[in-house]
Image (cartoon, rainbow, N blue to C red):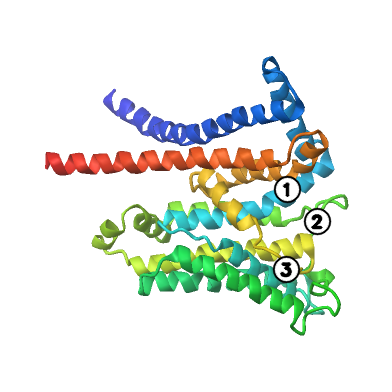
Amino acid sequence: MSNDKNQQKSFSNPLVKGLKALAFPFLAIIIAVFVSVFFVMWAKGYSPLQYFSALNDLFKTIWNGSFGDKRKTLETMVYVTPLIFTGIANAVAFRCGLFNIGVAGQFIVGMVSAALIGLIPGLNPIVHGILIVLGGIVAGAIWAGIPGYLKAKIGTNEVINTIMMNYLALYLGNYIILRSRFAVKGKANTPLIQKSAELLRFSNISRANISLIIAIVCAVFIYWLLKKTTVGYEIRAVGLNASGAEYGGINIAKNTILAMVISGAIGGIGGATHIAGVMHQAQDMMALPSFGFDGIAVALLAKNNPIGCIPSAILFGALNSSSKMLQLNGIPKEIVYLVQSIIIIFVATDYIVKYFSEKKKKRKVLIDG
């Protein structure tokens, strides 16, 4: 009987932990929607008694704007796909206790590499597609590996270094797009990539393409890497307790560089597939692409779970995709940013509460000892 009870406990514990992990993100979403409805009421002139009418209006508009028909659903996936990549990229860094603010820059170098590799003529479509993905991996890995190496060997702050690398990527990308031999005279873009370099689209009515499948495969692979391999165990150990990991024989410097390289490689794939599947050419950038920063929110909401980044990216992608429909219905598009901000605040609050509770536990252990 005792064995049966132990088995039941072993099965129920992961389930309870999983439900607890999901509870806070769901609560954050519910509170974000609850608060945002008041802004809808203010924008559209609803009375205080019409709260649920405003709630229905908000949900209906977001749904119709992002999943209202086949074309809108597929176009929403255009927003979702890069968010999956950037979410996973940020999640890997977070798991190692690192803050990779440079995913936007890694996304840019992935885009530029794809725009250049895509110009190579006479290649088989499969070979060309593989080369573009590999180019994104190499470019993103190098771009993230530099601040990772500096963090591991010199101890410089990765946040500052990755921010600087973002702007280096932006200006280098714009130089190649506008002033190099690859620039199109009189235009602010590179030439269109070869047809063999274009990723297969799901339908003629949308830009959604097989990069979505690549993103999902990437999420599953990274989840397996972090959970089931020695490499993943060491990365997670360094993130949980660097001193304890080092005491256990884990090389902190090696895993710091490795986590940043993996994170950058995933961001690079996101940029490369965005060019090959959606844009088909690199264009002049006035600012850093938002996908890199939105990926931080995606990772936080997913609790740094690579597979959890998929539904998290769908939520943020749907909000971004529905912004035009919100405006057409008299609801300010800024409400999208409001919802996202409230979600981030509440998810961040959960991390702060955990930080102080763990600190309290450590203090208690020291006092008892």
State the image quarter where residue 8 is shown: top left
Identify the image quadrant of the C terminus: top left
How many other residues sit within 10 Å of disc 2, few (<14), some (14-19) or many (≥20)? some
Name the residue carrying label 3: 129
Q: CA distance from mark 3 to mark 1?
A: 20 Å
Closer-to-camera residue (276/178)? 178
Image disc number at residue 269: none
What residue is at 73 percent from the left and 38 percent from the top?
A: 332
Tell me: 29 left or right of 289.
Answer: left
How many other residues sit within 10 Å of disc 3, few (<14), some (14-19) or many (≥20)? many
What residue is at 88 percent from the left and 53 percent from the top?
A: 204
Tell me: 76 left or right of 270.
Answer: right
State the image quarter where residue 226 is shown: bottom left
Question: Nearer the N terminus, badge 2 or badge 1?
Answer: 1
Q: Position of residue 205 (x, y in %)?
A: 87, 50
Q: Is residue 247 above or below residue 206?
A: below
What residue is at 23 percent from the left and 44 percent from the top?
A: 362
Q: Can residue 218 be seen here? A: no
Q: Is residue 289 above or below residue 135?
A: above
Name the residue carrying label 2: 201
Name the residue carrying label 1: 77
**Residue at the limit of the structure toward the left, as seen here:** 369
Disc 1 marks a residue whose amino acid type is: Met
How many numbered dots are placed on residues in this image? Answer: 3
Callout in the foreground (3, 1): 1
Disc 3 marks a residue whose amino acid type is: Gly
Q: Position of residue 145 (x, y in %)?
A: 49, 71
Q: CA distance from mark 3 to mark 2?
A: 13 Å
Q: Position of residue 208 (x, y in %)?
A: 77, 52
Q: CA distance from mark 2 to mark 1?
A: 11 Å
